[in-house]
Image: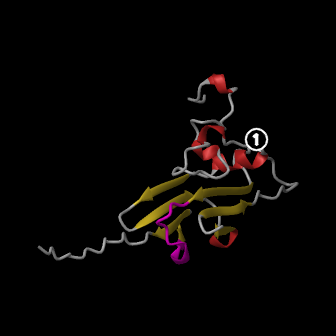
Amino acid sequence: MSMIPSIFGGRRSNVFDPFSLDVWEPFNFKDFPFSSSSSNEVSALVNTRVDWKETPDAHVFKADLPGIKKEEVKVQIEDDRVLQISGERNVEKEDKNNRWHMVERSGGKFMRSFRLPENARTDQVKASMENGVLTVTVPKEEAKKPDVKSVEISG
């Protein structure tokens, strides 16, 4: 049972579920409550769980992708600021000699997109995959230290 109030029609795509948005923009809230999509892609998005943490040096994304090979995953940067993780999980082929009792694992395409903040170094993104977990590291620009110039006081 969903924890989201039923006043939104029971849909997961609403203001309380930022992961149901096509592009999650945590740094731009002006149209946050009104951004949603009802396409089938959105339901596939919800199935791919992603954690995003910010360290002093980087933004780190971790996606659970069990049973998917690294060759089946694409990590792209679009428009200099949107990180996109996509791929496809293949469904096991049906064999006439087998008798299925239950099928719960889903297959199909998945895609998640995240708008990166201004301090992201999109030219230095690194990705690795180990034990079904994709880790994408986006380094941050070093904070500029203000130039301080002493001014002599005449007098």
Inspect the image, locate mark 1, and give the three-letter code of the amino acid beneath it: Ser
User: Residue 71 falls in which quadrant of the image?
Assistant: bottom right
- Colour theme: secondary structure
Image point (47%, 63%), residue name? 60
The residue under label 1 is 38
Q: Is residue 61 left or right of residue 31?
A: left
Q: Is residue 71 left or right of residue 137?
A: right
- The residues colored magenta run 116-127
Taking depth in this image into account, of 5 and 26 the one nearest to the observer is 26
Any part of residue 141 in sight: yes
- In this view, the residue farthest toward the left is 155
In percent of width and height, residue 152 lies at 16, 77
Q: Which structural element holds mark 1?
A: loop
Q: Is residue 153 magenta?
A: no
- In this view, the residue farthest toward the right is 96
For disc 1, the neighbor class at 10 Å (few under 14, some 14 to 19, many from 20) is few
Asked if residue 80 is positioned above or below residue 21 in the image, the reply reads below
In percent of width and height, residue 139 lies at 45, 71
Taking depth in this image into account, of 35 and 42 the one nearest to the observer is 35
Q: Quadrant of the C terminus?
A: bottom left
